Every structure is written in C-alpha cells, then in structure tokens.
Amino acid sequence: MYDRTTIAGLATATILALTASATAQPAGTTYNRPFVSSEAAQTITDTCIEIAREWDVRLAVAVVDPFGILIDFHSMQGASETSGTTAQLKAKTAARWRRTTAEVNRMVTTGQNIAPEWIGDFPQPGAVPIIIDGVVAGAVGVGGLGGNPHNYGIPCAVAGIEAAFGSGFVPE
C-alpha cells in the first residue's frame, strides 16, 4: 500500500510532466492562413456575372471564406428562385471538402464517401475551392444552371478566380 507521501510525489511528478508537454510550444503561437479578401471576392463575382451576361444565362454567384462564411454574393435578375441558395451551399461544400463539388458529387454517387450528404453538404457540380500556398483560402459557388447541359458554373468560377489571383489557384 502506498502512503500519502508517495502518492503526493507521484501526483506532483505527473503534473510537472503534463505541464512540460503542454508548454512545449511557445505561448501565443498562432497559425496564419490565407483568406480571400473582400476585394478579391468582388472581382470574382463581377467577372462571373459579366461572363454570364455574355453567355445570356442567369445565375447566382457566392464567394465564401475557408470556413464557409459568405464574403460576396450576387444573384442576377431572372435567376431561378433557388439559384442563390444553391450557389452558397455549393461554395460552402467546396470549401469544407477542399475540392470541386463535381468531385464531391462523384464520391457520393459512386458510394466512395456519402458523408457529405449526412452532414448537410450540397454535393452538386458548380463550385471550386480557391487554393493559395496549398491551403484553401475560400471557394466560389455558382447556382441556377441545373438543367443547362453546358455546365457554365465551373468555367465561370475559374474565370473569376483567375481574374482575382491569376492562374494556378484552383485544383486540377
């Protein structure tokens, strides 16, 4: 049987060991990550809307940060009632899964991973994540083209991202 002194000594040694491992990183250490700025988000949206006008299609565009928080949004006059909602849901899904929603859709429809449906994501094609230095900085979702066989959403989103950042910021 252990006496009180032995138990107190073991407890003190355990606390000191835990404190030492907990303080292995300097206090105040932070993680810096890229975010899409408001100005970049507006450039993306404006570019996509201009392209939609050239193609004579009506759509909605949503740009979100890495956590799915809406930064910029525009729904064109004449876009369908659900366009705005689907644009935002697609953008959030692309940001969360760090890949295009077309790829997430493929994962779900093949049964490879159906978690996006369980957790309330919207795995429908039309959104692209924005990758800066290998990290998701945001995403662009385009809604309102559900029945359109030309899939204008992805080229529109990519053109907007390239207008804001140049090439090389979308997954291949």
Image (cartoon, rainbow, N blue to C red):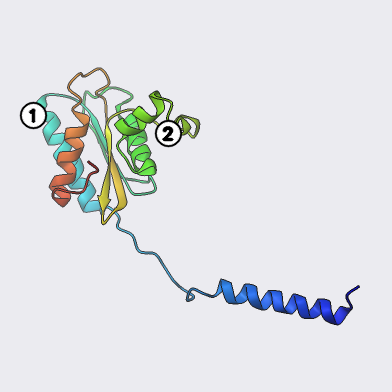
* Image spot of residue 169 (x, y percent): 21, 48
Q: Nearer the viewer, mark 2 or mark 1?
A: 2
- 4 relative position to 144: left or right: right
The one of 87 and 157 positioned closer to us in this rendering = 157
- Where is residue 161, by image quadrant? top left
| Nearer to me, 33 or 107 | 107
Where residue 125 sits in the image (x, y, percent)?
29, 29
Q: Amino acid at mark 2?
A: Asp
Judge left or right: residue 29 versus residue 39: right
Of 50 and 93, nearer the camera is 93
Q: Which residue is mark 1?
A: 54
The kind of residue tagged 1 is: Glu
Residue underneath mark 2: 121
- The residue at 34%/36% (across/down) is 88
Q: Is residue 11 left or right of residue 23?
A: right
In the picture, residue 101 is in which quadrant? top left
Q: Residues within 10 Å of mark 1 (few under 14, many from 20)?
A: few
Residue 156, quarter of the rendered image: top left
Reply above or below: 57 against 68.
above
Residue 165, image x and y in percent? 16, 51
Q: Is residue 127 visible?
A: yes
Disc 2 element: loop
Name, please, the residue furthest toward the front. 1
Instruction: Tell me the crowding category of disc 2: few under 14, some 14 to 19, or many 20 or more residues within 10 angstroms, Cα based.
Output: some
Measured Cα–Cα span from mark 2 to mark 1 = 31 Å
